[in-house]
Image: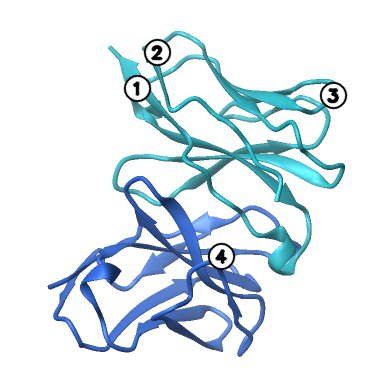
Amino acid sequence: DAKTTQPNSMESNEEEPVHLPCNHSTISGTDYIHWYRQLPSQGPEYVIHGLTSNVNNRMASLAIAEDRKSSTLILHRATLRDAAVYYCILKKNYGGSQGNLIFGKGTKLSVKP
Amino acid sequence: DVKVTQSSRYLVKRTGEKVFLECVQDMDHENMFWYRQDPGLGLRLIYFSYDVKMKEKGDIPEGYSVSREKKERFSLILESASTNQTSMYLCASSPGTGGKQYFGPGTRLTVT
């Protein structure tokens, strides 16, 4: 299984942008890059995903390197509510076991007021 | 909004008891999953199912079984609870094409 590498923790100030990096040098052509986050005492929630092109949604933006060996999740203006563990996951877009998520340790984001 | 609900947020059971954790989703999803989450170990997949009455072992199935008699419901069973099964248990569902997973709030199980 292709693996991802993320920093254990990051800090940000409220209302500033946050760039969360993820390295995935062994990514294959069929791997999508997914991001989930887990707020304290809650189950994980989907944030965004992409294949090759940069993606934007109401929660965040995903910037994918041209060689796809790394990506960055961008929170444009961090709020206190964004304090969570962020997981970068490679996932195949299949049904069945090949499409399962494999969670790593993630990055714990702290947001200071 | 997709809703995945779990029967209890907190549960305390004694060693040797049979424990049932229930999960229900309301989006007609084919796939359902059970994970456990422990400090330092992250989320690990116990079992999953991609159809009614179908089940497959995940990474750590030992000591657990599952049941999926109806599409919307996926149960995790601890036949004889042990203290090393004290953990946070998370249920998730996703559509059959392998799209994003929706998680429930979790059940924190303590086995004494």
Work out whether mark 1 precedes mark 2 in sequence or the reverse, and give the earlier one: 2
Q: Residue at x 62, y 27 (%)?
A: A22
The answer for how far apart the CA atoms under marks 1 and 2 are is 6 Å
Residue annotated with mark 4:
B93
Q: Chain of mark 2?
A: A
| Front residue of this view, candidates B110 and A12 | B110
Q: Dividing the picture into quarters, in which one does residue B20 lie?
A: bottom left
The answer for how far apart the CA atoms under marks 1 and 4 are is 28 Å
Secondary structure category for the residue under label 2:
strand
Is the residue at mark 2 from the same chain as the one at mark 4?
no
Give yes or no for contact between labels 1 and 2 (Cβ–Cβ under 8 Å).
Answer: yes
Give yes or no for contact between labels 2 and 4 (Cβ–Cβ under 8 Å).
Answer: no
Give yes or no for contact between labels 1 and 4 (Cβ–Cβ under 8 Å).
Answer: no
Q: Colour of chain B?
A: blue
Q: Is residue A62 visible?
A: no
Secondary structure category for the residue under label 3:
loop
Q: Residue at x 59, y 32 (%)?
A: A5
Q: Quadrant of the C terminus of chain B?
A: bottom left
Residue annotated with mark 1:
A110
Which disc is residue A12 wearing? 2
Residue annotated with mark 3:
A67
Q: Residues within 10 Å of mark 1 (few under 14, many from 20)?
A: many
Of labels 3 and 2, the one closer to you? 3
Q: Residue at x 48, y 79 (%)?
A: B74
Q: Colour of chain A?
A: cyan
| Front residue of this view, candidates A104 and B4 | A104
Q: Number of marks in the image?
A: 4
